[in-house]
Amino acid sequence: MSATIKDVAQRAEVSVATVSRVLNNLPGYSEDTKQKVMQAIKELGYQPNAIARGLINKRTQTIGVLFPNVSSSFSSEILHGVEEEAHKHNYSVIVCNTAEDGKRTMKYLQVLREKQVDGIIFSSGVLKEDYYKAMQTMGTPVVLVATKSDYDQVPYVKVDDYQASYDAADYLIRQGHRRVAMIGGSWLDPIAGRPRIEGFRQALKDHGVETRDDLILDGGFSFEGGVAATERLLASVSDVTAVFAAGDEMAIGAISAASRLGISVPEQLSVIGFDNLKLAEMSNPPLTTVSQPLQEMGRLASRKLIAMMESGAPADSEIVPHELIKRRTVCPPS
């Protein structure tokens, strides 16, 4: 049977309250008493319970993180940064997969409430009103990463999706491309769909390049969606020389579809992605892409959340810089 805090108190010949103060770094005991308590903990193999500690300091040293797709390369990059920063401050992380369209979000918010997490990081999806109300009821601070909301008191960490997409299209046009297509998300998606489409269209407009609705396709931010969208595009439009895919998985899908159709990248079709996932370096040829620093975004979100939890003060939102990473999938049209 595992040791309890009472066992530690008896072994150290102190009160349970003193053991709690030692465990939570509170004042009110001598250095000698602290050493006796720590020795008792070591001898008994006592493991402090996070919820029990929370009854003393009102905190469990845990953070809840919600992703719409935990297994994606995008989410794992952000999570790496979140965990790295959290563990540096002795916080544990509970990861929740909310599934497509946030089907499980309310369920997991209830789980996080029961676990008494100290704060929540919400990634990628739309912070719907019912999610926000549930978080307000929990009374825990929230930070958004790779998304934003209209709630002023909820800080976010993200890139400027509009400008990043503008820069991707601008690069293709400056390479000499005039028939440029886009594979992105849905226009109804206010986070990564519409802003990236708007940035793409504005870049074409500023360069006097024709914008056509049939050259903007929804790839669903997946490899399979990128393949399907590219096959539809190339079957219906013969003179496209470049594709901007608003996600690296879709971009790699575009390269794969082109290869199946006997179209060489970049000689016959230039492709540029968005994210700079590990997959971008591994694709054949290596993918030119717009990089958003996902790990750093995770670290920043975690750092802001911990500061809010420990100080009670609000945090500012932050737009992090993006960068064009030039590899081997873009060249001037032949």
Image (cartoon, helix red, strand yellow):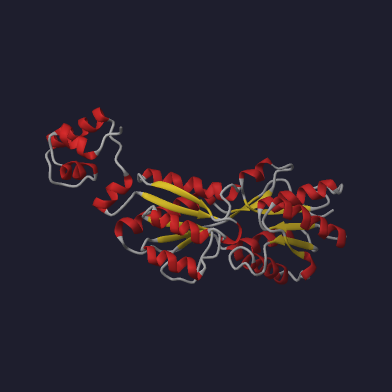
Callout count: 0
What residue is rendered at 43% in x and 71% in y?
152
Q: Position of residue 13 (x, y in %)?
A: 12, 34
Q: Position of residue 324 (x, y in %)?
A: 63, 53
**In the picture shown, does residue 128 fall above or below 57?**
below
Q: Quadrant of residue 172?
A: bottom right
Q: Position of residue 211 (x, y in %)?
A: 76, 70
**In the picture shown, does residue 27 fall above or below 144?**
above
Q: Residue most toward the top? A: 43
Q: Position of residue 194 (x, y in %)?
A: 64, 68
What residue is rendered at 20% in x and 39% in y?
6
Q: Nearer the viewer, residue 96 or 295?
A: 96
Q: Is residue 237 visible?
A: no
Q: Residue most toward the front? A: 1
* 21 with respect to 80 (left or right): left
Q: Is residue 3 visible?
A: yes
What residue is rendered at 38% in x and 66% in y?
137
* 165 with respect to 305 (left or right): right
**In the picture shown, does residue 308 fall above or below 208?**
above
- Quarter in which the N terminus is drawn: top left
Q: Nearer the viewer, residue 3 or 203?
A: 3
